[in-house]
Every structure is written in C-alpha cells, then in structure tokens.
Image (cartoon, helix red, strand yellow):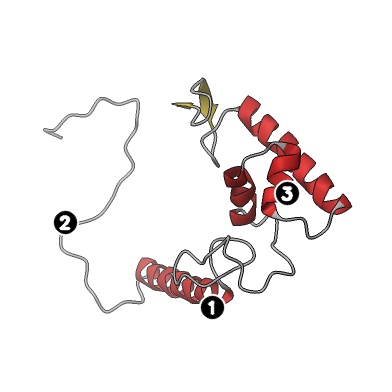
Amino acid sequence: MPDVRNCKRCGRIFNYIGGRPICHDCKKQDEEEFKKVKEYLYEHPKASILEVSNVLEISVQKIKSYLREGRLEIVGNDGNLILECEKCGRSITTGRFCNECSRELSEGFKSSAEEISKSASGDTDKKKPAGMGMKYLNKYEKWNPEK
C-alpha cells in the first residue's frame, strides 16, 4: 500500500518512498539550489554562509541543512559558531555529530546489533516464555479471534 503524504514544503500530496518528506518537485528545486551553492563555492572557495546566502538568494537555514547532511563543509574557520554537535555541543564543520560522538554512537549501534543477533540465534541464556512466538498471517484471510 503506498504511503501518501503532504509535502512538508509546499503541502502537495505525494507518494512518499523514503528520505526527506518532500515531493519530487521540491526535491528537484532543492537539488538545483544545491548545485548553485556548489558551483558558487567552487568559484569562491571559503565564502561565508552569509555571502552565499545573499548572492544566491538561498536561505541560511537551507545552506545549514546542506552542512548537516554532510554535503558541504566549513573550512578555514577555527571554532565556527554555525554548526554544533547535536550530542555534546562541540563546534563541527559538517554533519550532525563530532567525530568522538559519531564513534560512540556507532559503537553503541554495533553492540546493540550484536545483542539482537545473539538473541535471535538463541545464544542467550534467557528462556522464551511458554506460548510466546510469532507466525505468518495470511493478509487475505479474515481475522477470526476464535481460531
């Protein structure tokens, strides 16, 4: 069944297939604006976020979103005040997390995945409660609580 949503930017209805919840037209416009930013930075390395925003008439917030997505990086500005790690608050140049927090999060995900894998393969000492489990349900068959 398709996942139909309203675009967060323009409000139009679209078939959501993952990623940012915006329609195809808004994604296309976003890519065109990113291309302009990329080309401007190629011609004007080390331009400030305000300069890029003013010259290209693209919001600072949108440029920040490109930085958060890891598509742009702040260079030559020690201790920038534009981006901060979402976990610890340190100044960063791209993405959402500093290297230390990224490593910490990655290790946490890895250990959680290993625990899940162990429990799924039965390598755990914990016993499953009697009567607990799962089974396949035929989605075309009507549910009958008396079965």
Residue nearest the observer in this picture, 110 or 131: 110
Picture layout, residue 97 above or below residue 9: below
Mark 1, other Cα within 10 Å: few <14 / some 14–19 / many ≥20 = few
- Provide residue 6's location: percent of width, then percent of height: 46, 25
For the residues labelled 3 and 2, the Cα–Cα distance comes to 65 Å
For the point 69% across and 31% down, the residue is: 28
For the point 54% across and 34% down, the residue is: 17
> What number is the disc on residue 25?
none
Residue at disc 3, secondary structure: helix
For the residues labelled 1 and 2, the Cα–Cα distance comes to 44 Å
Amino acid bearing label 3: Glu
For the point 69% across and 63% down, the residue is: 74
Q: Is residue 50 left or right of residue 108?
A: right
Dot 3 corresponds to which residue?
A: 51
Discs 3/2, front: 3
Quadrant housing the N terminus: top left
Residue nearest the observer in this picture, 147 or 53: 53
Picture layout, residue 75 above or below residue 138: below
Dot 1 corresponds to which residue?
A: 100
Amino acid bearing label 2: Gly
Amino acid bearing label 1: Glu
For the residues labelled 1 and 3, the Cα–Cα distance comes to 31 Å
Q: Is residue 143 left or right of residue 6?
A: left
Dot 2 corresponds to which residue?
A: 131
- Provide residue 142's location: percent of width, then percent of height: 25, 25
Q: Are marks 3 and 2 in contact (CB under 8 Å)?
A: no
